[in-house]
Image: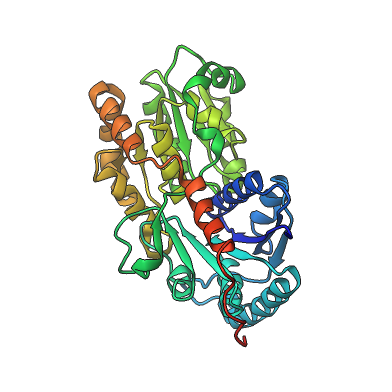
Amino acid sequence: MKPYKFILSGGGTGGHIYPAIAIANELKLRFPDAEFLFVGANDKMEMQKVPQAGYEIIGLWISGLQRRLTFDNTLFPLKLISSLIKARKIIKQFKPDVVIGTGGFASGPLLQVAAFSNIATVIQEQNSYPGITNKLLSKRANKICVAYENLERFFPKEKMILTGNPVRQDVLNTDSKKSEAISYFNLDANKKTLLILGGSLGSRRINQLIATELDFLLASGIQIFWQCGNFYMTEYKQFSETENVQVVSFIDRMDLIYAAADFVISRAGASSVSELCLVGKPTIFIPSPNVAEDHQTKNGKAIADKNGALLIKESELGEKFETVFNRLLHDENLQKDLSENMKKLAKPNATKDIVDEIIKLVQSPKLESPQTL
């Protein structure tokens, strides 16, 4: 039998890239002879992160529509046509058994071409409120793996499988890594550690908040590990000169920093939420209001509504942050409740369950002959 061939497409942010890599790694574990190809968007972070993970990637000339009138928006129709043509060429040459989309600009044209070519397609939707691309793609997708319940109003119910979000396997067992983590990041073992996560691209508002509240936070006797994002590193690296503060643009060992952390302040991107549920650290979510359909607020609220985390809207930070953080820091019963409730929402087998569904597809009888694109 010929080796299976898989195309994966997901990018723009780590929240789309790392789930795709996690799925590819699990498929590779089960099918060592399989062939893999990633498709991303030119000039986006997947063009670096995917090769670093050991996979080949091809870029499409594609970007999302901006909410305001821009020059990029006028180019969108041309970019879309260009990407559809290139996606068709990629599909025709690589001849995949299945195409898997985890979101991001490039997944739209690629999965559209695959579906019209009657190649099996799988959507992995990370958020509690899907974006318009996946809503459109869902009409022709074979399976839709979701991380949240009650998405029937967006997707055909018969195609949905509740799996959770794929996460890096090394974050599954962080409890035993505390000592290693303290040493790796040169932290003080006698101080509680606050981890600040702004998402893979960083968060301007969270960075501004921490800079403003730094004296307040340090007065409580904690140490701070602050991921500010590449874009903001020049502006905020000066704070690393402050005692008990480390500022980094990117964290290469998420398993260890989760092990070291006692408290977390984080955006509410889908991957971050899923990973934090697995590690179960007391968390304050500060969702970004600047994402499609405000899905971060919905992601964070799905956890907060079940008493698994605290949530503060950006618009309420000035009036609520110090009160909420003080409560989290000093109320051990609250810390325990949040941790336990968060862990109940975790889905540690998500990657394996998604790959099980993909395997069912590739081992099922072939689809009908391709339609004309």
Residue 53 image offset from top left, x and y in percent: 69, 45
Q: 360 or 156: nearer the eye? A: 360
> In the rendered image, which quarter contains the N terminus?
bottom right
- Dividing the picture into quarters, in which one does residue 16 lie? bottom right
Is residue 327 left or right of 98 when viewed as pictured?
A: left
Q: 289 or 178: nearer the eye? A: 178
> In the rendered image, which quarter contains the C terminus?
bottom right
Does residue 89 sit above or below 325 in this rendering? below
Residue 55 image offset from top left, x and y in percent: 72, 51
Is residue 35 left or right of 112 when viewed as pictured?
A: right
Q: 206 or 77: nearer the eye? A: 77
Does residue 101 sit above or below 24 in this rendering? below
Is residue 100 shown to the viewer in this render? no
**Which residue: 38% across, 32% down?**
280
Is residue 214 left or right of 56 when viewed as pictured?
A: left
Does residue 369 sit above or below 47 in this rendering? below
Residue 274 image offset from top left, x and y in percent: 43, 44
**Which residue: 44% across, 71% down?**
132
**Which residue: 36% across, 67% down?**
158
- Dividing the picture into quarters, in which one does residue 364 lie? bottom right
Does residue 351 sit above or below 149 in this rendering? above
Is residue 293 shown to the viewer in this render? yes
Q: 215 or 302: nearer the eye? A: 302
Is residue 86 left or right of 332 when viewed as pictured?
A: right
- Dividing the picture into quarters, in which one does residue 251 lie? top right
Tally the marks: 0
